[in-house]
Amino acid sequence: MKRSLIALMAAAVSAAVVLVPTAGNAVSRDSGPVAATTCAPVPVSAPSGTKVESVKAVAHAGGTVTFPAAPPLHPAEETLTDVPAWCDVTVTVSHPGANDHVTIRISLPQDTKKWNGRFQATGGSAYLAGDLSGAPLVGAMKAGYAAAATDAGVGANPLDVSGWALTPDGKVDTPLLKNFASRSVHDMAVIGKDVAKRFYGRSVSYAYWNGCSTGGRQGYQAAQDHPTDFDGILAKAPAINWDRFAVATLWSQAVFNEEKVAPSQCELAAFTTAAVKACDTLDGVEDGIIDSPQKCHWDARRLTGTKIVCDGKEITISRATADAVRKIWAGPVSSSGRKLWYGPNKGASLAALAAPGAPFFVADSWVKYFVTRNPSFDITKLTYTSFAQIFRTSQLRFNDIIGADDPNLSAFAKAGGKLLSWHGQNDELVPTQGTVAYRERVNRVFGGDKRVDDFYRLFLLPGVSHCIGGTGPFPTDDLGALVDWVEKGRAPATLAASVLGPDGKTVTRDICRYPMVARYTGHGDTASAANYRCVTA
């Protein structure tokens, strides 16, 4: 379970940052005009309805930057070397009537020559709107960007919403939820670009968004609500359709209760292994990956009666357990059998979303604090009926705030924006088909793939888990592909990807844009991208 949560959100979570060496102190906002590369507060322009409360600046000498481990999402220490000297400009803002205090941090290379003229806003993970002092922010700055992150006024804990979700009288804190959903991203875009302009004495040439999971959802929301904020949006494993997916991922708890089963992780893994074995070669290559899970029609009930060994004990797979897994893969339905949302793809680990008595924490918090407004609500007691009621309530109350599913991207397309998005086919947390369904809705608005591909391209990554990890090839330079598309007009037909195979050999693949898929030509090394071609799925 912990390993799934570690891989889950991929925008590294750090509780603190150790800077070696560092220098500099906060400077008061009244310091007066300063040279462009002097690390000092600058005047700040904010969007209408946003009030600037304070501006501070801290200079860092650069060198080696170490990010301490912060389990469970960031289990290992991470170090960046050769980081240039930089300036952190921290802006605190509020919104009249919201009783909030939002922090936005902009990290800027202090040497003008080390700035590439671009702005990059970085996204969050789980209930973290952005990592103010983590690797994504400093890494983007090291790459030459004026980089930004925001805490949306909800703090720095990706797991716990108890400190901000509800007001003292037990109501949802709607202003803070709106901050988390979208408002703070817009504030960060406007303020971040303005700070960069004042710091360097010239405007940002191009503005980019970069985020996964929650960060992916934030990117889609920006394209829909504020289409001119970013020239290019890189939105990975996007947690869009939040009002639905955040409840749908609790479906397994209802299934286990109704079917009266509580399979072990070993049993659940047996179903995944069997599905992969059955459908691995549908694409013509045996590599331990289901390339196109929607074409895998293997029925979980076929494992009924199979004997497996778990913790040294022989277990026989029951029909009830097989039925439960089949229903989890199929996704939640209403009491009348109407499909409500999507289940995880066959091939994706069931450890995080289908652990009896251990609901996925993002969904657990969503239902407790936002949908039912009852922190004591017991998710593990869900039934088919109560699940359907909660699903409907979440959709009715929160789609407009955090759904991020408006398919009309006309304003974004007209502004010349480019949205590059990818989703792993083995995503164990955010069902891949939710992203595919959104893309199909956009297709219907614009009249098909060809028109949509002009500004929005989706890539489905076989074998890749949530944001990072898995058995499939992972993109090697997705941001570079987006930059080339925005600045040079080179729309990516494929994304270069690679992974170290189980035999220690590097496997490469060019991931084809949706709805195309890569297929082996029948000649040459199956581990080489050169021997695959994009074909219609």
Image (cartoon, rainbow, N blue to C red):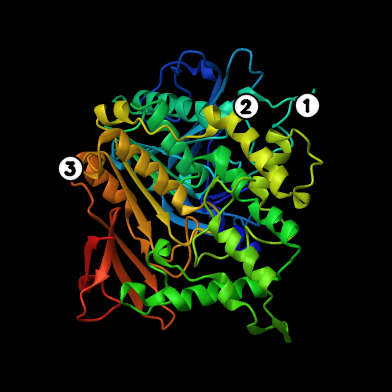
Comparing marks 2 and 3, which lies closer to the viewer? 2
- Residue 453 position within the rendered picture, expressed as x and y whole percent measured from the top left: 24, 43
Q: Earlier in the sequence, mark 1 or mark 2?
A: 1
Q: Quick one: label 1, few (<14), some, or many (20+) residues within 10 Å?
A: few
Viewer can see residue 40: no
Comparing marks 3 and 1, which lies closer to the viewer? 1
- Residue 450 position within the rendered picture, expressed as x and y whole percent measured from the top left: 21, 43
Q: Is residue 165 left or right of residue 203?
A: right
Mark 3 secondary-structure assignment: helix
Query: How far is disc 3 from disc 1 in space, using C-alphas?
Result: 51 Å
Residue matched to label 2: 176
The quadrant where residue 103 appears: top right
Q: Quick one: label 3, few (<14), some, or many (20+) residues within 10 Å?
A: few
Query: How far is disc 2 from disc 3 in space, using C-alphas?
Result: 38 Å
Q: Residue at x 68, y 45 (%)?
A: 387
Residue matched to label 3: 488
Contact (CB < 8 A) between labels 2 and 3? no
Comparing marks 1 and 2, which lies closer to the viewer? 1
Residue farthest to the right, as pictured: 376
- Quadrant occupied by the C terminus: bottom left
Residue matched to label 1: 170
Q: Amino acid at mark 1?
A: Gly
Q: Is residue 357 left or right of residue 192?
A: right
Q: Is residue 168 left or right of residue 134?
A: right
Mark 1 secondary-structure assignment: loop
Viewer can see residue 88: yes
